[in-house]
Image (spheres, rainbow, N blue to C red):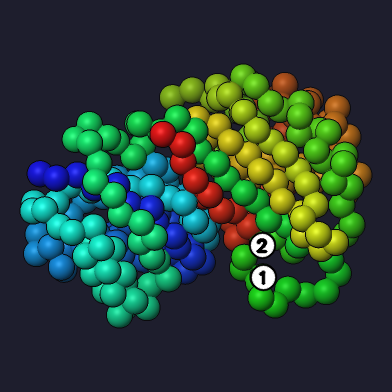
């Protein structure tokens, strides 16, 4: 069976996350249904990472095995047409042939996320459900300085969901940068080989407390060292998180 690698973009607002769930709208479920319709056989797709409800994807990568050879343009065109017909804000950006041993999840060397904060008093309009609205001014320099304490190999128990299924809380964080995009927008850029459930949103929420002056960088470090979920600050809302790309 030929294997294909696809780049997927999606607005996660109205989905119960990536992973297929019976009777619930999910990104995986929508794509599999669309692909099964034009290939005329059941389809199971495998993703580089499973995003939570409300999280968006710009560079999600999947692999899929099909029973017959298909032109790459036809895979993208047919899938997108059926998704559009059912009003799914999901799109196949690119389709490629993949080696038989390529695995979207296990072949990945690094995953990249972006978290968006709109930092202004005025209500959100075009960025509603696309970013975290924080009205109080944030000290971006303090946030970035504190973020650097979390780089490297650590036990991130504090910053993972109690429902996280990973066998170990140990992760190596390769990047955690906080920077101002313009006078209203702040972005948090992070990358690692793998993340824990809710890790990025937990980090973003705790860094926001630093930006507000409610926490110091020492408080953030103490939260990390506590290895206790109760020590985590606010968990940032899903709407500001974007799965940007995957390195292979």
- Numbered tag placed on residue 131 in the rendering: 2
Q: Is residue 202 above or below residue 91?
A: above
Q: Position of residue 50 (x, y in %)?
A: 42, 46
Q: Would you say 168 lies left or right of 130 here? A: left
Quarter of the figure that contains the C terminus: top left
Q: Would you say 237 lies left or right of 15 here? A: right
Q: Is residue 14 above or below residue 1?
A: below
Quarter of the figure that contains the N terminus: top left
Front residue of this view, candidates 32 and 77 = 77
The residue at which mark 1 appears reads as: 127
Q: Residue at x 82, y 40 (%)?
A: 143
Q: Would you say 180 lies left or right of 27 here? A: right
Q: Is residue 61 in view? A: yes
- Numbered tag placed on residue 16 in the rendering: none
Badge 1 element:
loop
Q: Are there few (<14), some (14-19), or many (20+) residues within 10 Å of tag 2?
A: many
Residue 227 placement: quadrant: top right
Q: Is residue 143 above or below residue 115?
A: above
Q: Residue at x 69, y 26 (%)?
A: 151
Residue 224 placement: quadrant: top right
Q: Residue at x 57, y 45 (%)?
A: 113
Badge 2 element:
loop
Q: Position of residue 142 (x, y in %)?
A: 87, 39
Answer yes or no: do the residues labelled 1 and 2 have beta carbons within 8 Å? Answer: yes
Q: CA distance from mark 1 to mark 2?
A: 6 Å
Front residue of this view, candidates 51 and 105 = 105
Q: Would you say 194 lies left or right of 187 here? A: left
Q: Position of residue 192 (x, y in %)?
A: 55, 32
């Amino acid at each position: 069976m030929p294997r294909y690698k696809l780049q997927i973009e999606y607005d996660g607002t109205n989905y119960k996350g990536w992973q297929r769930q019976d009777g619930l709208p999910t990104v995986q479920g929508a794509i599999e249904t669309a692909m099964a319709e034009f290939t005329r056989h059941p389809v199971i797709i495998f993703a580089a990472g499973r995003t939570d409800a409300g999280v968006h994807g710009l560079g999600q990568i999947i692999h899929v095995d099909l029973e017959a050879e298909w032109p790459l343009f036809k895979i993208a065109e047919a899938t997108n047409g059926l998704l559009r017909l059912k009003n799914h804000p999901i799109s196949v950006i690119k389709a490629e042939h993949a080696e038989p041993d390529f695995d979207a999840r296990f072949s990945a060397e690094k995953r990249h996320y972006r978290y968006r904060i709109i930092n202004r008093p005025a209500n959100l309009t075009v960025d509603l459900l696309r970013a975290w609205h924080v009205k109080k001014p944030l000290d971006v320099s303090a946030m970035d300085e504190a973020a650097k304490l979390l780089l490297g190999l650590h036990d991130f128990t504090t910053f993972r969901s109690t429902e996280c299924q990973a066998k170990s809380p140990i992760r190596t964080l390769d990047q955690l940068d906080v920077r101002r995009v313009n006078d209203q927008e702040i972005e948090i850029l992070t990358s690692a080989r793998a993340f824990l459930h809710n890790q990025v949103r937990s980090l973003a929420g705790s860094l926001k407390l630093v930006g507000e002056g409610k926490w110091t960088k020492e408080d953030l470090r103490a939260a990390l060292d506590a290895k206790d979920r109760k020590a985590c600050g606010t968990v940032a809302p899903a709407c500001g998180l974007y799965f940007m790309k995957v390195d292979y």
